[in-house]
Image (tube, rainbow, N blue to C red):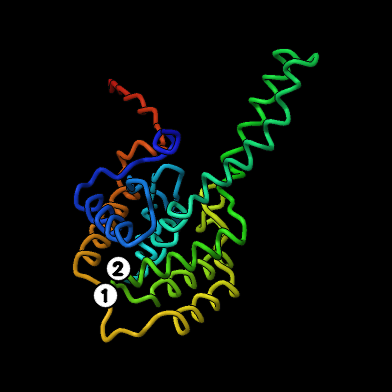
Protein backbone atom coordinates (compact mmCIF):
# COMPACT_ATOMS: atom_id res chain seq x y z
CA UNK A 1 0.00 0.00 0.00
CA UNK A 2 2.82 2.40 0.83
CA UNK A 3 4.49 1.76 -2.52
CA UNK A 4 1.26 2.36 -4.43
CA UNK A 5 0.44 5.47 -2.41
CA UNK A 6 3.82 6.98 -3.21
CA UNK A 7 4.02 5.82 -6.83
CA UNK A 8 2.03 6.08 -10.04
CA UNK A 9 0.86 2.63 -11.07
CA UNK A 10 0.75 2.22 -14.86
CA UNK A 11 -2.83 1.32 -15.75
CA UNK A 12 -2.25 0.78 -19.49
CA UNK A 13 -3.61 -2.78 -19.93
CA UNK A 14 -1.19 -3.67 -22.74
CA UNK A 15 1.91 -2.76 -20.70
CA UNK A 16 0.59 -4.16 -17.41
CA UNK A 17 -0.55 -7.45 -18.93
CA UNK A 18 2.72 -8.00 -20.79
CA UNK A 19 4.97 -7.39 -17.77
CA UNK A 20 2.73 -9.55 -15.59
CA UNK A 21 2.87 -12.37 -18.17
CA UNK A 22 6.68 -12.29 -18.25
CA UNK A 23 6.76 -12.29 -14.45
CA UNK A 24 4.30 -15.18 -14.12
CA UNK A 25 6.27 -17.25 -16.62
CA UNK A 26 9.43 -16.75 -14.56
CA UNK A 27 7.55 -17.46 -11.33
CA UNK A 28 6.22 -20.77 -12.71
CA UNK A 29 9.81 -21.83 -13.30
CA UNK A 30 10.95 -20.68 -9.86
CA UNK A 31 10.82 -21.97 -6.29
CA UNK A 32 8.35 -19.30 -5.19
CA UNK A 33 5.65 -20.66 -2.87
CA UNK A 34 3.41 -17.59 -2.89
CA UNK A 35 1.35 -16.08 -5.74
CA UNK A 36 3.12 -13.24 -7.53
CA UNK A 37 1.37 -9.87 -7.65
CA UNK A 38 3.05 -7.76 -10.33
CA UNK A 39 2.53 -4.07 -11.08
CA UNK A 40 4.37 -1.53 -13.22
CA UNK A 41 5.12 1.82 -11.61
CA UNK A 42 6.22 5.02 -13.29
CA UNK A 43 9.82 5.85 -12.46
CA UNK A 44 12.89 6.87 -14.44
CA UNK A 45 15.20 4.84 -12.22
CA UNK A 46 16.36 1.46 -13.52
CA UNK A 47 14.93 -0.74 -10.82
CA UNK A 48 12.53 -3.45 -9.72
CA UNK A 49 11.27 -4.03 -6.19
CA UNK A 50 10.30 -7.29 -4.51
CA UNK A 51 8.55 -7.36 -1.16
CA UNK A 52 7.60 -10.15 1.26
CA UNK A 53 4.40 -11.91 0.29
CA UNK A 54 5.05 -11.99 -3.44
CA UNK A 55 4.53 -8.30 -4.24
CA UNK A 56 6.62 -7.28 -7.23
CA UNK A 57 6.97 -3.81 -8.75
CA UNK A 58 8.77 -3.03 -12.02
CA UNK A 59 9.87 0.52 -12.81
CA UNK A 60 9.21 1.87 -16.28
CA UNK A 61 12.88 2.91 -16.27
CA UNK A 62 13.92 -0.74 -16.25
CA UNK A 63 11.74 -1.54 -19.27
CA UNK A 64 13.13 1.41 -21.20
CA UNK A 65 16.74 0.56 -20.28
CA UNK A 66 16.45 -3.03 -21.51
CA UNK A 67 17.26 -3.68 -25.17
CA UNK A 68 15.57 -7.09 -25.29
CA UNK A 69 13.04 -9.20 -23.45
CA UNK A 70 15.85 -11.44 -22.22
CA UNK A 71 17.46 -8.44 -20.49
CA UNK A 72 14.18 -7.38 -18.88
CA UNK A 73 13.49 -10.96 -17.81
CA UNK A 74 17.03 -11.24 -16.41
CA UNK A 75 16.47 -8.35 -14.00
CA UNK A 76 12.99 -9.59 -13.12
CA UNK A 77 14.25 -13.14 -12.49
CA UNK A 78 16.78 -11.78 -10.00
CA UNK A 79 14.04 -10.02 -8.03
CA UNK A 80 11.70 -13.03 -8.19
CA UNK A 81 14.58 -15.05 -6.73
CA UNK A 82 14.53 -12.72 -3.71
CA UNK A 83 10.85 -13.60 -3.25
CA UNK A 84 11.43 -17.33 -3.76
CA UNK A 85 14.29 -17.37 -1.23
CA UNK A 86 12.25 -15.23 1.19
CA UNK A 87 15.11 -12.75 1.54
CA UNK A 88 12.84 -9.85 2.45
CA UNK A 89 11.04 -11.88 5.10
CA UNK A 90 14.27 -13.24 6.55
CA UNK A 91 15.81 -9.77 6.62
CA UNK A 92 12.70 -8.29 8.23
CA UNK A 93 12.72 -11.04 10.87
CA UNK A 94 16.33 -10.24 11.75
CA UNK A 95 15.48 -6.56 12.04
CA UNK A 96 12.42 -7.32 14.17
CA UNK A 97 14.53 -9.40 16.56
CA UNK A 98 16.95 -6.48 16.91
CA UNK A 99 14.06 -4.08 17.38
CA UNK A 100 12.55 -6.22 20.18
CA UNK A 101 15.47 -5.17 22.36
CA UNK A 102 13.80 -1.79 22.89
CA UNK A 103 10.51 -3.27 24.19
CA UNK A 104 11.56 -3.34 27.90
CA UNK A 105 11.86 0.45 27.75
CA UNK A 106 8.06 0.60 27.70
CA UNK A 107 7.91 -1.08 31.09
CA UNK A 108 11.02 0.35 32.75
CA UNK A 109 10.43 4.05 33.21
CA UNK A 110 10.14 4.83 29.55
CA UNK A 111 6.37 4.86 29.31
CA UNK A 112 4.72 6.14 26.16
CA UNK A 113 7.71 8.33 25.35
CA UNK A 114 9.86 5.23 24.96
CA UNK A 115 7.13 3.56 22.91
CA UNK A 116 6.97 6.60 20.63
CA UNK A 117 10.74 6.54 20.21
CA UNK A 118 10.56 2.85 19.28
CA UNK A 119 7.88 3.53 16.69
CA UNK A 120 9.93 6.40 15.25
CA UNK A 121 12.95 4.12 15.02
CA UNK A 122 10.75 1.54 13.32
CA UNK A 123 10.40 3.82 10.31
CA UNK A 124 13.90 2.78 9.32
CA UNK A 125 13.07 -0.91 9.23
CA UNK A 126 11.91 -1.14 5.59
CA UNK A 127 15.03 0.66 4.37
CA UNK A 128 17.20 -1.76 6.31
CA UNK A 129 15.63 -5.02 5.21
CA UNK A 130 15.47 -3.94 1.57
CA UNK A 131 19.26 -3.55 1.51
CA UNK A 132 20.06 -7.22 1.15
CA UNK A 133 23.37 -8.70 2.20
CA UNK A 134 26.01 -9.77 -0.30
CA UNK A 135 25.12 -13.39 0.43
CA UNK A 136 21.45 -12.80 -0.41
CA UNK A 137 22.42 -10.99 -3.59
CA UNK A 138 24.69 -13.81 -4.73
CA UNK A 139 21.97 -16.35 -4.02
CA UNK A 140 19.44 -14.27 -5.99
CA UNK A 141 21.89 -14.07 -8.89
CA UNK A 142 22.28 -17.85 -8.96
CA UNK A 143 18.58 -18.67 -8.53
CA UNK A 144 17.51 -15.94 -10.94
CA UNK A 145 19.87 -17.31 -13.57
CA UNK A 146 18.32 -20.76 -13.13
CA UNK A 147 14.77 -19.37 -13.45
CA UNK A 148 15.73 -17.38 -16.54
CA UNK A 149 17.25 -20.46 -18.18
CA UNK A 150 14.31 -22.73 -17.28
CA UNK A 151 11.92 -20.15 -18.78
CA UNK A 152 13.71 -20.47 -22.12
CA UNK A 153 15.50 -17.12 -22.15
CA UNK A 154 19.08 -16.47 -23.17
CA UNK A 155 20.89 -16.46 -19.79
CA UNK A 156 23.26 -13.84 -21.19
CA UNK A 157 20.37 -11.39 -20.83
CA UNK A 158 21.07 -11.23 -17.10
CA UNK A 159 24.70 -10.37 -17.76
CA UNK A 160 23.74 -7.68 -20.27
CA UNK A 161 21.24 -5.92 -17.99
CA UNK A 162 23.58 -6.16 -15.02
CA UNK A 163 26.34 -4.52 -17.06
CA UNK A 164 23.95 -1.72 -18.03
CA UNK A 165 22.97 -1.16 -14.40
CA UNK A 166 26.59 -1.17 -13.24
CA UNK A 167 27.55 1.29 -15.98
CA UNK A 168 24.62 3.57 -15.17
CA UNK A 169 25.44 3.49 -11.47
CA UNK A 170 28.91 4.85 -12.26
CA UNK A 171 27.86 7.44 -14.87
CA UNK A 172 24.46 8.50 -13.50
CA UNK A 173 24.03 7.31 -9.92
CA UNK A 174 20.50 8.73 -9.71
CA UNK A 175 19.32 6.42 -12.48
CA UNK A 176 19.75 3.37 -10.23
CA UNK A 177 17.39 3.57 -7.26
CA UNK A 178 18.97 3.38 -3.82
CA UNK A 179 15.92 3.37 -1.56
CA UNK A 180 14.02 0.60 -3.37
CA UNK A 181 16.96 -1.34 -4.79
CA UNK A 182 19.48 -3.77 -3.51
CA UNK A 183 23.19 -3.42 -4.16
CA UNK A 184 23.94 -2.60 -7.80
CA UNK A 185 25.72 -5.53 -9.47
CA UNK A 186 29.49 -5.27 -9.12
CA UNK A 187 32.09 -6.46 -11.57
CA UNK A 188 32.75 -9.53 -9.40
CA UNK A 189 29.08 -10.50 -9.38
CA UNK A 190 28.85 -10.12 -13.15
CA UNK A 191 31.92 -12.32 -13.62
CA UNK A 192 30.39 -14.92 -11.29
CA UNK A 193 27.18 -14.97 -13.32
CA UNK A 194 29.20 -15.45 -16.50
CA UNK A 195 31.11 -18.35 -14.93
CA UNK A 196 27.87 -19.95 -13.74
CA UNK A 197 26.46 -19.77 -17.27
CA UNK A 198 29.50 -21.55 -18.65
CA UNK A 199 29.89 -24.07 -15.84
CA UNK A 200 26.34 -24.90 -14.73
CA UNK A 201 24.03 -24.45 -17.71
CA UNK A 202 23.90 -26.83 -20.62
CA UNK A 203 23.98 -24.92 -23.88
CA UNK A 204 20.76 -25.02 -25.89
CA UNK A 205 20.35 -24.72 -29.67
CA UNK A 206 18.05 -21.71 -29.28
CA UNK A 207 16.91 -19.21 -26.67
CA UNK A 208 14.31 -16.50 -26.43
CA UNK A 209 16.23 -13.24 -26.85
CA UNK A 210 13.60 -10.80 -27.99
CA UNK A 211 9.93 -10.73 -28.97
CA UNK A 212 7.71 -8.47 -31.02
CA UNK A 213 5.63 -7.90 -27.88
CA UNK A 214 8.61 -6.44 -26.02
CA UNK A 215 9.36 -4.12 -28.93
CA UNK A 216 5.73 -3.02 -29.07
CA UNK A 217 5.42 -2.47 -25.32
CA UNK A 218 8.69 -0.54 -25.11
CA UNK A 219 7.67 1.71 -28.03
CA UNK A 220 4.25 2.24 -26.44
CA UNK A 221 5.84 3.14 -23.12
CA UNK A 222 8.35 5.49 -24.76
CA UNK A 223 5.51 7.27 -26.53
CA UNK A 224 3.62 7.70 -23.26
CA UNK A 225 6.73 8.89 -21.43
CA UNK A 226 7.45 11.47 -24.14
CA UNK A 227 3.88 12.77 -23.99
CA UNK A 228 4.05 12.94 -20.23
CA UNK A 229 7.23 15.00 -20.31
CA UNK A 230 6.01 17.52 -22.88
CA UNK A 231 2.30 17.69 -21.99
CA UNK A 232 1.70 21.21 -20.62
CA UNK A 233 -1.39 19.96 -18.79
CA UNK A 234 0.55 17.33 -16.84
CA UNK A 235 -0.35 17.93 -13.21
CA UNK A 236 3.04 16.71 -12.05
CA UNK A 237 4.88 19.49 -13.85
CA UNK A 238 5.20 23.03 -12.49
CA UNK A 239 3.51 25.62 -14.65
CA UNK A 240 4.20 29.32 -14.87
CA UNK A 241 1.15 31.32 -13.94
CA UNK A 242 0.96 34.73 -15.58
CA UNK A 243 -1.23 37.65 -14.69
CA UNK A 244 -2.99 39.10 -17.75
CA UNK A 245 -1.97 42.66 -18.54
CA UNK A 246 -4.74 45.25 -18.15
CA UNK A 247 -6.09 46.66 -21.36
CA UNK A 248 -5.45 50.35 -21.94
CA UNK A 249 -8.26 52.47 -23.20
CA UNK A 250 -6.96 55.54 -25.05
CA UNK A 251 -9.17 58.45 -25.92
CA UNK A 252 -8.03 60.91 -28.57
CA UNK A 253 -9.41 64.45 -28.75
Instruction: Say if residue 78 shows up in the picture.
Output: yes
Residue 39 seen by the camera: no
User: Is 94 situated left or right of 151 in this image?
Assistant: right
Which mark, residue 32?
none
Q: Quadrant of residue 198?
A: bottom left
**Is disc 2 surrounded by few (<14), some (14 to 19) or many (20+) residues within 10 Å?**
many
Q: Position of residue 45 (x, y in %)?
A: 46, 55
Mark 2 — residue? 151
Q: How many marks?
A: 2
How crowded pointer 1 is (Cα within 10 Å; few <14, some 14-19, many 20+) is rated as some
Which of the image's four quarters has the C terminus? top left
Residue 93 in the image: x percent, y percent? 58, 40
- Element type at marker 1? loop
Please name the residue that numbered disc 1 is placed on.
208
Q: Residue at x 39, y 64 (%)?
A: 65
Observer-nearest of 57 and 101? 101
Nearer-the-camera pick, 240 or 108: 108
Q: CA distance from mark 2 to mark 1?
A: 9 Å
Q: Position of residue 118 (x, y in %)?
A: 68, 26
Rendered position, 246 above or below 196: above
Looking at marks 2 and 1 on the same chain, the residue that comes earlier in the sequence is marked by 2
Front position in the image: 229 or 159: 159
Q: Is residue 175 left or right of residue 202?
A: right
Residue depicted at 30% across the width and 84% down the height: 204
Amino acid sequence: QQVEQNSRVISDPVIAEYVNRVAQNLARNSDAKVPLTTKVIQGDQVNALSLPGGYFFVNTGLILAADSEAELAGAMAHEIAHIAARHGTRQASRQEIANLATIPLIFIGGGWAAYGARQAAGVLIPVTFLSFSRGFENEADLLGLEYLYKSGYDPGGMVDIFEKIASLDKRKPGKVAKYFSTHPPTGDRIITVQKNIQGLLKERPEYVVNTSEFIEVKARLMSQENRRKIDPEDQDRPRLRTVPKPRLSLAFR
